[in-house]
Image (cartoon, rainbow, N blue to C red):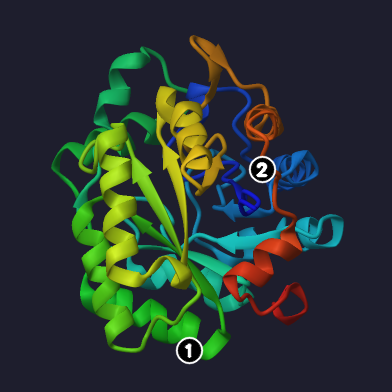
Amino acid sequence: MPKSVIITCAPTGGIHTPSMSEHLPITPAEIATASIEAAEAGASIIHLHARDPENGRPDPRPETFLRFLPTIKQSTNAVINVSTGGGLGMSMEERLRAATTTSPEMASLNMGSMNFGLFPLLEKRGEWKHDWEPEFLGMTRDFIFPNTFATIEQALRELGGKHGTKFEFECYDLGHLYNLKWFVDQGLVKSPFFIQMVFGILGGMGAELDHLVHLHRTADRLFGPENYEWSVLAAGRHQMPFATQSAMLGGNLRVGLEDSLYIGKGELAVSNAQQVERIRSIVENLGLSVATPDEARERLGLKGGDRVSF
């Protein structure tokens, strides 16, 4: 029997800006509501960033996260995943602060330094609600998102070693799998672990099916299929097609307004739950089932929601 499909939802992220969609959750109350609705729609993992409620800018402060994490935990059984990606331009200390404060079951971790080009998004708007938005997008023309071996090890030791947090290892390119392999070989990453293959970001892999298949085969060879779970996310218009392909190939998937603001061609998604409902319908029409949060916990070897600090 095929395994059930783990759906992750990323409700807000640190890429899209408030001017791009009125439906992007900004305030703690909006992020909590979006997360709860996504969990009710079928997401078993909620991948979370925070935003300054005054202007929507990515916000690393633990106190901002703590304005919505307890509400989500009390209202759902979903696995809560706190991002260490933060917002582009933050230091690793800033990026880790929310996760080390809240000690979540999961945290995301980017597995390599990379160009992270958001500047093409400038061409899609002429007016902005906040001055920081075009400045934030434009600076990525000359920006490297740093994730060195030293800072990755710092996250693994502080969060994994001291808090028992496990990771959504975000791999934007083939070399990121080999970086992860090095940490596995050093004993800093133990199975079962969770690889999120990311496609469609300028600076990373393009959203092409051949790349997905090649990464999956490479991961199987490097780690052994019994030792890890894999998932796929793709940016923008590639979101639903790539999520569907992952499910068809036996993998898991991620949706959410962090990755795409749309539900169809030229049609903004009105909520994260709408995207979850759409992909859940596709998965179930393929004859597959959707994993519950507790199924995800068991397959990923998580510590349990009773051992977090919020």
Quarter residue 182 falls in: bottom left
Q: Residue at x 48, y 23 (%)?
A: 20
Query: Above or below — where is 194 with respect to 239?
Result: below
Question: Looking at this rendering, what residue extends furthest in the front direction?
Answer: 1
Query: What is the x, y in percent for residue 118?
Result: 29, 34
Query: What is the x, y in percent for residue 32?
Result: 74, 48
Instruction: Give whichever of 223, 25 is nearer the camera.
Output: 223
Query: What is the x, y in percent for residue 232?
Result: 44, 45
Give the Cα separation between the discs numbered 2 and 1: 32 Å
Q: Earlier in the sequence, mark 2 or mark 1?
A: 2
* Residue 194, disc: none
CB of mark 2 within 8 Å of CB of mark 1? no
Q: Quadrant of the C terminus?
A: bottom right
- 203 sits left or right of 106 in the view: left
Q: Residue at x 48, y 82 (%)?
A: 160
Question: Looking at this rendering, what residue extends furthest in the top direction?
Answer: 266
Query: Above or below — where is 150 with respect to 288?
Result: below
Query: What is the x, y in percent for residue 96?
Result: 45, 71
Q: Amino acid at mark 2?
A: Thr
Q: Label 1: few (<14), some or many (≥20) within 10 Å?
A: some
Q: Residue at x 52, y 26 (%)?
A: 261
* Residue 27, disc: 2
Question: Looking at this rendering, what residue extends furthest in the right direction?
Answer: 75
- 260 sits left or right of 268 in the view: left
Q: Is residue 112 visible?
A: no
Q: Amino acid at mark 1?
A: Gly
Q: Secondary structure at mark 2?
A: loop
